[in-house]
Amino acid sequence: MHEDLGSSIVAKTQRAKVYHASDSTINRAWFTSYHEYQDHLQFLEDLVAQHPNNSEIVTSGKSYQGNDISAIHIYGNDGGGVMPAVVFHGTVHSREWITTMSSSTITARNLEAKPFVDKYDFHLYPVVNPDGFIHTQTSDRLWRKNRQSTTLATCPGRDINRNWPYKWDTPDGSSTDPCDVLFRGETEGDTSETQVLTTALHKVERQQGLKLYIDWHSYSQVLMTPYGYNCSYVAEGNDEMRLIARGAAEAMTSVYGTNYTSGTICQVLYEASDNSIDYATDIVGGDYAFGVEVRDLGDHGFVLPPEQILPTCREAFEGVKYLLRNLR
């Protein structure tokens, strides 16, 4: 697999034409190919232009290389900042392009789902690791981390999802080696991206309460509950979250028969310390926190073909609808 795979994929699927959200409905063409970072930002701008009374762009801060970390804020007739918050993070790991697209369809569909937007405020971040995402499209398709410098010039980057300031020094579940894809950083929370995201989560919790947090990933087809840092522990309220996760997995499976399962992070994947889901649960105090790993099971892995974008997005939206309908 050549290093410039990312740029060749984007060149073949997107550069000949820049897609925008349509004037009245979601532009299906958007979901037939992968897109560059700036086009994702434009897509959000187009959605806001269509729904100026119920949405806005919020830029929470800058990445290490100075790119915007932006969300679309979607709200109902009561106005923004009033109802309990739902926060989604996409493209934490830069090679997981399908999570960027899943966030896009959920964003667009929520604008058409009035019962949801009148009940919750949505803060949806399609790309929280823009530096790494851009790098996958120009240099190394399978790059995972951000692009922050380390003590080794030949090994840049930290795994943003092993850098959250909670259980950071747990012996297993992350790496102290800058060359490892699981490198947790030199100190807890020392990535620009983690600092931006933790600040934004705490702000939402203070102002309106964090009802639901989802961290989107690929691949494994599984819905996960806390915790990742220890396989023997489960979060308070885990029985309820486990049942809801199982129901959401079944809802996703029902769309095309794609098999989705559920369980705690540590039990269904592996030990993963310093992650955002554990942080949102125990430090921020969110009511519900899940990790979702969308398609596939490894046939294509991180390089999911464009023809699977729309089916994956439909599955993701069914899972989200189930979750939103069953929160207390």
Image: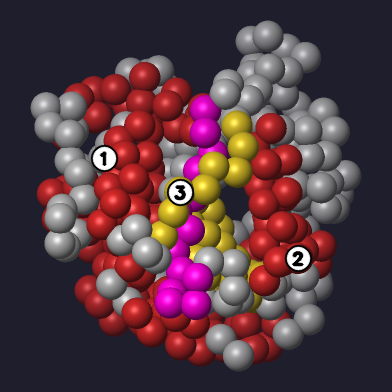
**Dot 3 corresponds to which residue?**
57
* Residue 286 horizontal/vertical position (percent): 71, 71
**Over which residues does the magenta segment extend?**
67-79
Of residue 128 and residue 256, the one placed in the foreground of this image is 128
Q: Is residue 214 above or below residue 172?
A: below
* Residue 15 horizontal/vertical position (percent): 18, 27
Label located before the other in sequence (1 or 3): 1
* Residue 29 horizontal/vertical position (percent): 13, 49
**Dot 2 corresponds to which residue?**
206
Q: Residue furthest top?
A: 153
Label located before the other in sequence (2 or 1): 1
**Residue 78: within the magenta?**
yes
Residue 208 shows up from this direction: yes
Type of the residue with mark 3:
Ile
Type of the residue with mark 2:
Arg
- What is the secondary structure assignment of the residue under circle 3? strand
Q: Which quarter of the rendering shows the C terminus?
A: bottom right
**Dot 1 corresponds to which residue?**
34
Q: Quadrant of residue 18?
A: top left
| Residue at position x 56%, y 86% in the image | 327
Answer few, some or many: residues within 10 Å of disc 1's Cα (few below 14, many 20 plus, some between 14 and 19): many
